[in-house]
Image: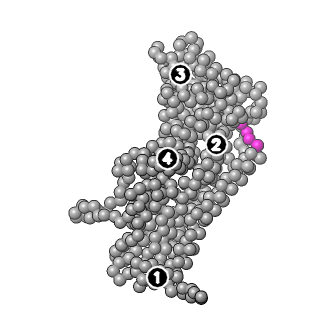
Amino acid sequence: MLVQEAQPCYSIQYNKRSLLVSFLFMLNLASMPLKAYFSEPLPWIRGLTSLECDINNLNCSESILTFFHNLTHFTAPGEHVFITPTLALFQVSLPPIQDSDASLYVSQMPFAIFYTRQQNRQAMAIANRQSNVSEFQAISSFQFLGLDIARCVFWATESVNGNFIYAGHILIQTSITWLGFKFVFRLCLTAYIIWCMWNSYYRHYTHLATNLCLYGVKDDPKVYEFEIIVGDPTSIILLNPVVSALFVVDFWISADIVAKALFDIAQLVGTTEFFFAYLYLSRTVWFAYGTLSIVSQLLKKLRCEKYFHGIDPTWTAIGVATIAGSLTYLQAHIKFFVQIYNYLFTFMINSDNAIESSLSATLYTFTIGILPAMFGFASHDQIHCQWLNVKAKRQMEIPVHPSSYLNNGIKNRVAISLSLLSLENEQIISAGGSIYRLFKYNNKFKKHLGLSQRDADCYIKWNSSQSQ
């Protein structure tokens, strides 16, 4: 039996503004791996660490100390910072020595979180008034997974104007091969993100357009022109566990740059350096996305979906970017965190003049990652801000249809509003959205619990005799 194919009878077009906005969202997401180079040197740009000392040579400690001492002559009077892309030197005031808890005083010393066992002993001697402040002097190795990634230099001075500690941090030069590998890795990650966006999101628009062209919509069979408003694929990629894992790897393969950022953010002497370190640590948002993906899968395995509610991805990014730097600064100045991190830095390594950062990196990753997940367990009414339309005169809430874009995240609401912006006074009536009624009834029907994925929704717009 022959079946006659349906003949195309509907006109389909894409909303150009939504295409532009969606492309910008795609470009922003795809370029995230390469944004690391706002703070990192490109492979073909290598900074010189020292003119007089091969920094990889463990026998050049005295030369390193002399090198940093000489840097103090290049600072203008009143300046407390000397910084380049590969090194930093800070002059920070020492707190007055108290007669109370010596361990509390040590934890309040500048950069105490990075002290080796030898430096902790020197600091305790100062706190107990068993040695002079000027006797505090040390050179330490900063390691990650057993590899030297930086050298830290500390020495203290006494004067009539107060006591000061000089803290220097210098990166160990890495090979062009390693820098090139990181660059290629990030290019491949960018390509993988673009492929995921196409494979998981954009390619389905061709099927949607074909079906609309052939069959239209049953809600209004007399309409022959349809406009597709393209959504934002960001939330789909954010919950991709492979992408999140690769971003965590990408963050820590630059452990030397991370160490420098942590060193810069542990003080407030150099505000510019503090700001750029703050900006670099905003990349830890991928710790949060990865944690949300793991929590989602775990809750579904345990059939505990009802206890968790999806989080707006935009607010997650803003929240983590805002909190990461300030939380890092607070951890470097609160006694409990200083002692925990310092213990993790020192207990795995045999040398008294070195610290190993891998365990601390694990704790730091977990701390940043778990914060947004905690909001997902909070009451939905406490964290979900419903978009309200308020009448100008009556100040009364207007019910919002489940399918309306007004239920989406703030970024997508603005984007869709721009796409629908018109000089004509048109009434918009929403239809569909039954899937969201189902989700509200029971979260277990969601594939991912971690992030709200409403922003990925596309919309079909058509004009009827009464409304749009």
C-alpha gap between disc 4 and disc 3: 45 Å
Tag 1: amino acid: Glu
Q: Would you identify the image quadrant in which residue 152 lies?
A: top right
Q: Which residue is at a point 64% across and 46% down the rendered structure image?
A: 249
> Which mark sits nearer the N-terminus, 4 or 2?
2
C-alpha gap between disc 1 and disc 4: 47 Å
Is there any visible trace of residue 166 in the rendered image? no
Is residue 99 rendered to the left or right of residue 350? left
Q: Which residue is label 2 attached to?
A: 252
Q: What stretch is highlighted in magenta?
A: 172-176
Between tags 2 and 3, which lies in front?
2
> Which mark sits nearer the N-terminus, 2 or 1?
1
Q: Which residue is label 3 attached to?
A: 106
Magenta: predominant secondary structure element? loop
Between tags 2 and 1, which lies in front?
1
Identify the element where label 3 is drawn.
Answer: helix
In the rendering, at what x and y percent does residue 63 appear?
A: 74, 27
Eyeballing the image, is 409 above or below 122? below
> Which mark sits nearer the N-terminus, 4 or 3?
3
In the rendering, at what x and y percent does residue 217 appear?
A: 45, 78
Q: Which residue is label 1 attached to?
A: 225
Tag 4: amino acid: Leu
